Image (cartoon, rainbow, N blue to C red):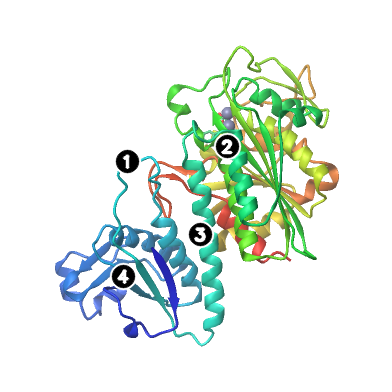
Amino acid sequence: MNIQLVNKEISDIDSEVLIEFITNSELKDHKNAKILNSAGFKAEQDSTCFLYEKSTLFCGVDSKKSDDLRSACAAMIKVLKSSNYKSAKISVVNKSAIKALVEGIVLGGYEFNEYKSEPKKVVLEDLFLASTDIDFGNLQTIFNEALIIANATCFTRDIVNRAPQEINPQTLSKLAQKLAKENSLECNVLKEDDLAKESMGAMLAVGRASVHESALIHLAYKPKNPKKIISLVGKGLTYDSGGLSLKPATSMVTMKMDKAGACAVLGMIKAVSEMKLDIEVHAFIGAVENMVGGDAYKPDDVLISRSKTTIEVRNTDAEGRLVLADVLDYAQDAVKSDYIFDFATLTGACMIALGQYTTGLMGHSHKLKHDISRAGADSGELISSLPFNNHLKKLLKSEIADISNTASKPYGGAITAGLFLDKFIRDENKNRWMHFDIAGSAYTEAPWDCNVYGATGAGVRLMCEYLKDIK
Ligand code: BES
Ligand code: ZN
Ligand code: ZN
């Protein structure tokens, strides 16, 4: 399917269907009010009504604001994709609508059909977005960037959605190398021997029972004279069985998504390089599979991390923080960056705290939190801050090692996980670091907003929005 922004009056565009977004109050005075009313259409948010004789698809919205347009557009594209029309056109009401429409179409129309023997046939070929804005050039730039970001989000979704027998640390490394080649990025993959040389005892322990070797993937996008240097770190658990602290059968299902942080940072560096932003971006991925076996790491083990901090393992299912402890430590040595952001499906507790739609944001710098929250609002992703405090920090105390990988109380589990990571952030980087818990927002089994079943690509739109305007 091809989406195009065209500098024409909508009436001058030749296409089979006209898409019209309409609010309930606009409906009353609409020239087709009577017939829409007979069809039972009330212009409720995300409802649609096809008037075949008018070749028009009406889409209900609560308002013409981005969030409502994006969601309605996602509902619209599903209807259009299941029709037999080849082309459709939409009038762009304002500048901010452009991004919402692109996201609604690309992300709401996304389907993962890799494993279906007979993928659905889609007749729709062309979607035209029409505008005669005097500043059309600017609109075109917004459109191009929105398309790059939406496609990068789908790229992330595609990897997360792949089955765990297909994506393991090795195949994930191959995908990263392929991306590096296509987008002219630097790429270095550390194998287990290298990880041992780096004394990454925490990360290595997690992957020990897997038949697949763990890997640390480092990608870099380096334009000339960058105005900032950013490090992105991703949790890449290609499968999280829980290890010896085995997950219950029903909780294990969907744990292929425990690589979503890694896939998100791949999507981010892809988008940044395609938008040619003048910032240097590094992506560090801890790619590991958490399995059971005679060689598995155990509750009661004491691990020596790369930073030499010793960690008492009390639960092998709290493995993401162990992997990130070593990758964060490595990343801080590898690059002196202005900011370091990690993305991880880290805790079920984050979902309990914020609901499954919202990413949890943790860190020390109020200014950074504020800037990121703003970008979040502009990106259409939901994000909310979870505050650190010293009382929760004490819950990570271990009697026999420097820190325990599990807090002594379950309350505030997303925050204690964030505080565990904080232990591996050096003093000089405390105000440069933010942790994003995407456990809830990265994957869904029911569609919402522009998300469909499966991976959502959480983090990609948010970070791209932040990085585009970074000062
Ligand atoms: N990968 C999980 C977190 C998760 C849970 C992500 C549900 C998405 C959906 C993580 O490794 C984990 O198992 N965390 C434990 C931590 C606990 C043992 C302290 C959890 O959340 O239960
Ligand atoms: Zn786990
Ligand atoms: Zn996990």
In the rendered image, which residue does mark 1 sit on?
Answer: 117
From this view, report whether residue 437 is shown above or below residue 209.
below
Residue reaching furthest to the right: 428
Q: Let me know if residue 374 appears in the view.
A: no
- Which numbered mark, 3 or 4, is in the foreground of this view? 4
Q: Quadrant of ligand 2?
A: top right
Q: Are marks 2 and 1 in contact (CB under 8 Å)?
A: no
- Which numbered mark, 4 or 2, is in the foreground of this view? 2
In the rendered image, which residue does mark 3 sit on?
Answer: 150
Q: CA distance from mark 3 to mark 1?
A: 26 Å
Q: Is residue 122 left or right of residue 251?
A: left
Q: Is residue 351 left or right of residue 298?
A: left
In the rendered image, which residue does mark 2 sit on?
Answer: 171
Q: Earlier in the sequence, mark 1 or mark 4?
A: 4
Which residue type does callout 2 highlight?
Answer: Thr
From this view, report whether residue 255 is shown above or below residue 221.
above
Residue 246 lies, in percent from the top left, at 53, 19
Q: Let me know if residue 469 appears in the view.
A: yes
Residue 87 marker: 4
Q: Residue at x 38, y 59 (%)?
A: 74
Quick one: label 1, few (<14), some, or many (20+) residues within 10 Å? few
From this view, report whether residue 331 is shown above or below residue 221.
above
Q: Is residue 29 left or right of residue 455?
A: left
Q: CA distance from mark 4 to mark 2?
A: 38 Å
